[in-house]
Amino acid sequence: MEKITALIRYKNSAETLPEVLKAIHAQTRVPERILGIDTGATDGSSDLLREAGAHIVEWDHPYHASKVLNFGISSCETPLIFCLSSHTVMHEPDTVQRLASELEDPAVCAASVKWDNDPYYTNKITWPELAEKGIKFGSIYTNSLGLFRRSLWKEYPFADAMTGIEDYDWALHQLKSGHSVARIEADFSYQRNGHNREMDFAARAFHLAHHYGLDLKWLGVGGAVRGLVQHLPGRLSGDEAATTSFQTCKNRLLGKILWRHYDFEKDKNTSK
């Protein structure tokens, strides 16, 4: 059985870390090591991790998702890295075990929990499937709750130029290299901090599709404009669902228009 390091990057996460750490220790397959990457905590987060048996490394530069992850992984020695957000709480005790079971297949480079229940992709994604279906908004693989092989990271670390979607880019690179990515269904909760990043993700999704020569499945310009018109009355009247749909159409349309002008090396995430 290959050993696992749980890698948690954090800043001021004292509110959520107790439940995150409790869920890790409640797993039927507890990682052999917990490594925390302190990106500037001042609220006692590091003490909580140390009390849970974690080793801490400190990142004393401006936050940059790809660089922070690569820095942390460089301090790991186990064959498998379980990467999770300091705001992500597992609610099922066999989540890590099930992820690890997926990597018993040598063709699988990584496995993560599904971000949603969309059945668009299979539970073991390959490059031919992506070439046929294209990229869809959402996660193929996520570093908020994912397990991957350190050996493959050593060959292709998370790209600085893809920060914010470094996990998506890494998975696409591995898929194009002939590996597969597994996805499982498991109950979890996630608390996002910081500003709405939907337009950022849309722009980055268009960038990834262009970079890998894949189609991007979305509403299309016409569909986005029709969505804006359809949901505008509800937005003006204060309807919450219409407001959300209007904002989604707007952000994806802006992402389509602006992605070529984005600085993808700049991390806009304020949630560690």
Image (spheres, helix red, strand yellow):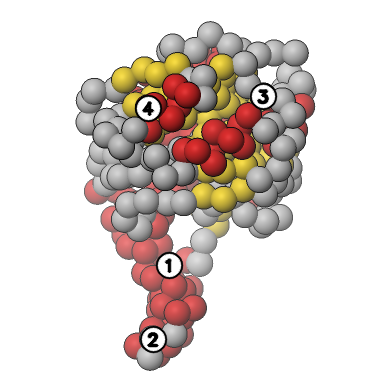
Amino acid bearing label 3: Val
Mark 2 / mark 4, whichever is N-terminal: 4
Q: Secondary structure at mark 4?
A: helix
Mark 3 / mark 4, whichever is N-terminal: 3
| In-front residue for pair 75/225 | 75
Q: Secondary structure at mark 1?
A: helix
Which disc is residue 12 wearing?
none
**Label 4: which residue?**
46
Residue 135 higher or lower than 154, as above or below: below
| In-front residue for pair 268/176 | 268
**Label 2: which residue?**
238
Q: Residue at x 35, y 88 (%)?
A: 236
Quadrant location, the N terminus: top right
Residue 257 lies in quadrant: bottom left
Residue 121 higher or lower than 272, as above or below: below
Amino acid bearing label 4: Ser
**Label 3: which residue?**
30
Q: Residue furthest top?
A: 77
Front tag of 1 and 4: 4
Q: Measure how far apart labels 2 and 4 are at the Cα level.
A: 42 Å
Tag 2 near tag 1, CB within 8 Å: no
**Label 1: which residue?**
248
Q: Is residue 103 left or right of residue 205?
A: right
Q: Residue at x 46, y 44 (%)?
A: 16
Q: Is residue 127 left or right of residue 247?
A: right
**Count of numbered badges drawn on the protein:** 4
Number of residues whose C-alpha sits closer than 10 Å to that of mark 4, classed few (under 14), some (14–19) or many (20 or more)? many
Residue 161 higher or lower than 225, as above or below: above
Tag 3 near tag 1, CB within 8 Å: no
Mark 3 / mark 2, whichever is N-terminal: 3
Tag 3 near tag 2, CB within 8 Å: no
Front tag of 2 and 4: 4
